[in-house]
Every structure is written in structure tokens, then in C-alpha cells.
Image: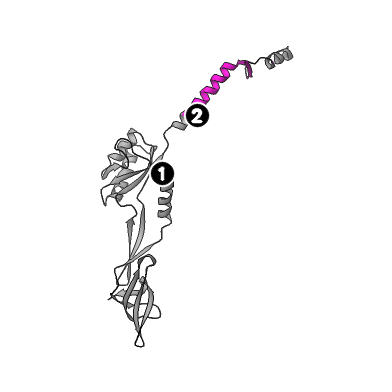
Amino acid sequence: MTNDKNEIVEHLSDMELGQDGIVSKEEVLSQKDAEFKETVKEAKAPQKRWYIVHTYSGHENKVKVNLEKRIEYMNMGDKIFRVEVPQKTVTKMKDGKKMDRDEKIFPGYVLVEMIMDDDSWYVVRHTAGVTKFVGSSKKPIPAKDSEIKKIIHKTQNQVTKVELDVKAGDKVRIISGPFSEFIGDITEVYPDKSKLRAMVSIFGRETPVELEYKQIQKI
């Protein structure tokens, strides 16, 4: 009997064998169609993306703190994931002393990683200090992943920038190196390299010397 049943199943073009016996081809197709629709539904489900939020100038860090508090208070941690204020460290040399400060890479903007819907939009948009999302007022535009990766990489792998309040024509005292205690007149400044060139009188002869910012003190 079993062999007869198997032979019949093999020759039925519109039938397939399931766990509980013979299942119609229509039922199989219906099941596969349901699985396909579920896959499409998951693909269309809102995905977390990075959005750029415009803030009042100088309020970037306050917006970050306020928004993080609202996310916790309003239980939105499943829709709003990260809030970032891209910054870099700038070291300023003054009177031979270093002073570090954080400088915004994009003043007036905050990055928010979130799943965009009416609720998450409301929480972010109505945070104190936020003026708008980048994009139209009703439909914020997510930032490109490639752009965000560059920004985050730049923040995490930042190179400390050194600034010095000097310019060509200023007199400086050299405080370290082989020309320590010499006085020089600055002829050129190279901010990108944190260096400068100065004319120093050595044995009565004006000699050009290249110095690092940390080697000099403005007179």
C-alpha cells in the first residue's frame, strides 16, 4: 500500500508530500507566498539611520545632554540610539603654556542615530535648543552612511591641532632647543604643521630658523 501511495504522489503534478501526508500544490504556493510577503515586510520595516539636527549656535552639547535625558525619561531607547557632537581637540600655545579646548567640527549641528517615525521625530524636534532636522520640515533626510563613517572616523582618529597667537613680524623668545634664549623675528607661520620660521641673530648674522610652536614664547 505504501509503495502504491508513493507511486501516486510521484505522478501527481499538482500535489506535494508534506509532513502530514499529501498537501496540495496550491497550499504549498500559498505558504511560500506568505513567507515572501513576510520577508518583504521585514525589508520595508523602518531601519535606524543617522539624521542631522540643526541647533542654536553654541548649544550643541546642551542639546546632546537634554536629548539623552528625554530618551531615557520617555523610554525611547528602542528608537533613538546615539547622539553625537563631532569635536576635535585644539591646543593653543600662549606664553609658552599649552591650553586645550574642544572645537566643534560642525558648529550648530548634532548627529542622531534613530528609527524615524512620528514619536521619535517629536522627541528630537522638541528638545530644547533644536531648531530643525536637515531636510524638509515634514520629511527629514537621512545622512549617507559613507558621510557619517567619515565624520565618526575623523572624530575617533583626530590629530591634535595646535594654534598660536602669533603672526609674521612678531618677536619671540626661543625657550627650548639649540637656540634657547635667542630672540627671533617671525617671517612665516605654518599653522597646518604647527611650525614657524624666524630670523635669529647668530654671531651677528641673521639666520633663518624653523621652530615648533612649543619652542617659542611671544614677547
Instruction: Determine if the magenta segment contains residue 12.
Output: yes
As shown in the figure, which amino acid type bears the numbered disc 2? Answer: Thr
Asked which colour scheme the image uses, the reply is one colour
Mark sitting on residue 144: 1
Residue annotated with mark 2? 39
Relative image position of residue 150 (x, y in whole percent) = 42, 51
Q: Residues within 10 Å of mark 2 (few under 14, many from 20)?
A: few
Residue drawn at point x = 51 percent, y = 23 percent: 34
Q: Earlier in the sequence, mark 2 or mark 1?
A: 2
Q: Which residues are magenta?
A: 11-40
- Provide the secondary structure element on which disc 2 rests: helix
Residue drawn at point x = 39 percent, y = 62 percent: 160
As shown in the figure, which amino acid type bears the numbered disc 1? Answer: Lys
Q: How many marks?
A: 2
- Provide the secondary structure element on which disc 1 rests: loop
Residue 178 quadrant: bottom left
Instruction: Determine if the magenta segment contains residue 26.
Output: yes
